[in-house]
């Protein structure tokens, strides 16, 4: 009679002792001085004190995010911590455009194998990014799934809660005809357009080492962490200086600014005023990418839009300019197509002139 095979979780690819040890080290990494965080890693869920006596009508702002296919490059080329900053910075930017203060983050790490060093780097990267954005990583989920993902690969997601006074929500409803549209500079691709970029790299592998600008090669430039804008605008939140904000991600200016333009108006954007980064010039030339495709796929150097009253634009540019390049690229005008509502992309954004490469 043949000996019966013994099945164990460890033989299937998961060692509970190893995962428990990793979780313990994660608990040390996410420790915070934020008194609103009422427990640490270990309980079934995270507790966060939402008592804000200074806010009369608190509104929670909720958002989920993932770093897209940039995480594939991060795993391949060793940008493990960096891609966590991408994810958290993107998450914070999407929360801040509503006028909110970021509070707490939950993460999810799904990986194909138990690599303690990589998992620690991921948690450290997210924790550091949260601290830089004045919020806290309060918990999450780490799932080892060897039958779902290949070894040494991971998929990241995260969610955030922010808070804003109801009367101070910024959703574009205060935008008026005549308002100025400001651009705040990006530092590169941020977290969008990587599927096209990876196709370009597959076709021309040598470009990874091509020096683009600032002494950095192509790979270094495309892996720059997503620019965080919270600290640049937090002093302006709760004032009457901002009528609307848009985080420029997938879809470019047209696909994101359109989401806050009120009915009966459109944003007229002068493309010749956009300060294009050398990285985008290189991608356009090497990939023979049309300008229309560049504008739909990439931020092209504009990571954030702020819509402000004309009388406030200089003050806003001066303040934000202490952190990032900030300049005027457009104006809110009356729409010539009646009944167009926010998010109807091509109808409430009008490009004038051409990109100047």
Image (cartoon, helix red, strand yellow):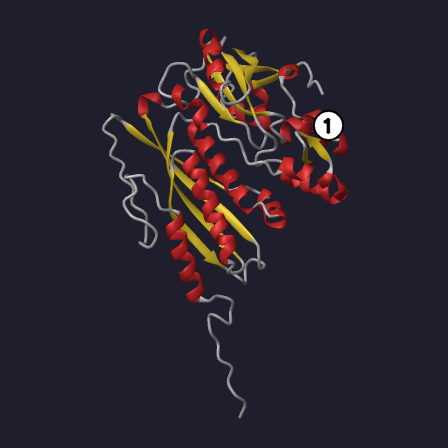
Question: Residue 258, position in %: x, y?
Answer: 53, 23
Answer above or below: position of 313 versus 150: above
Q: Is residue 80 visible?
A: yes
Which of the two residues, 157 or 343, is positioned nearer the viewer here?
157
Question: Residue 286, position in %: x, y?
Answer: 76, 33
Q: Residue at x 48, y 44 (%)?
A: 125
Answer above or below: position of 120 versus 356: below
Relative placement, left or right, of 337 versus 32 is right
Q: Around disc 1, counting alpha carbons within 10 Å, would you say few (fewer than 14), some (14 to 19), or many (20 or more)? A: few
Q: Residue at x 50, y 8 (%)?
A: 178
In the structure shown, which secondary structural element does the residue marked by tag 1 occupy? Answer: loop
Q: Residue farthest to the bottom?
A: 1
Quadrant where the C terminus is found in the figure: top right
Q: Is residue 97 visible?
A: no
Answer above or below: position of 357 versus 227: above
Q: Residue farthest to the top?
A: 311
Question: Residue 38, position in %: x, y?
Answer: 27, 45
Answer above or below: position of 175 versus 295: above
Residue bearing mark 1:
290
Quarter of image, res 71: top right
Q: Residue at x 55, y 36 (%)?
A: 225
């Amino acid at each position: 009679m043949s000996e019966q095979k013994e099945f164990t979780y460890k033989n299937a690819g998961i060692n509970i002792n190893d995962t428990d040890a990793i979780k313990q080290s994660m608990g040390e990494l996410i420790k915070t001085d934020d008194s609103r965080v009422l427990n640490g890693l270990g309980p079934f869920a995270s507790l966060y004190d939402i008592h804000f006596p200074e806010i009369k009508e608190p509104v929670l702002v909720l958002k989920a995010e993932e770093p897209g296919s940039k995480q594939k490059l991060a795993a391949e080329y060793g940008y493990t911590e960096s891609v966590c900053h991408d994810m958290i910075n993107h998450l914070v930017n999407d929360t801040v455009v509503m006028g909110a203060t970021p509070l707490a983050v939950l993460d999810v790490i799904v990986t194909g194998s138990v690599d303690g060093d990589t998992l620690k780097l991921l948690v450290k990267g997210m924790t550091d990014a949260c601290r830089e954005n004045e919020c806290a990583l309060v918990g999450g989920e780490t799932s080892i799934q060897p039958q779902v993902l290949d070894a040494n690969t991971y998929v990241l997601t995260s969610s955030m809660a922010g808070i804003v006074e109801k009367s101070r929500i910024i959703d574009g409803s205060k935008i008026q005809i005549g308002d100025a549209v400001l651009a705040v500079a990006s530092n590169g691709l941020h977290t969008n357009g990587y599927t096209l970029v990876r196709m370009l790299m597959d076709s021309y592998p040598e470009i990874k080492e091509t020096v683009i600008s600032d002494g950095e090669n192509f790979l270094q430039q495309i892996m720059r962490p997503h620019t965080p804008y919270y600290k640049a605008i937090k002093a302006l939140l709760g004032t009457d200086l901002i009528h609307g904000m848009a985080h420029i991600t997938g879809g470019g200016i047209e696909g994101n600014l359109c989401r806050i333009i009120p009915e009966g108006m459109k944003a007229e954007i002068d493309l010749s005023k956009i300060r294009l980064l050398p990285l985008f010039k290189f991608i356009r030339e090497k990939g023979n990418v049309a300008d229309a495709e560049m504008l739909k796929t990439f931020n092209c150097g504009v990571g954030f839009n702020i819509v402000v009253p004309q009388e406030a634009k200089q003050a806003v540019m001066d303040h934000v300019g202490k952190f990032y390049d900030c300049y005027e690229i457009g104006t809110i005008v009356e729409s010539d197509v009646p009944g167009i509502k926010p998010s109807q992309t091509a109808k409430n954004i009008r490009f004038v002139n051409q990109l100047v490469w």
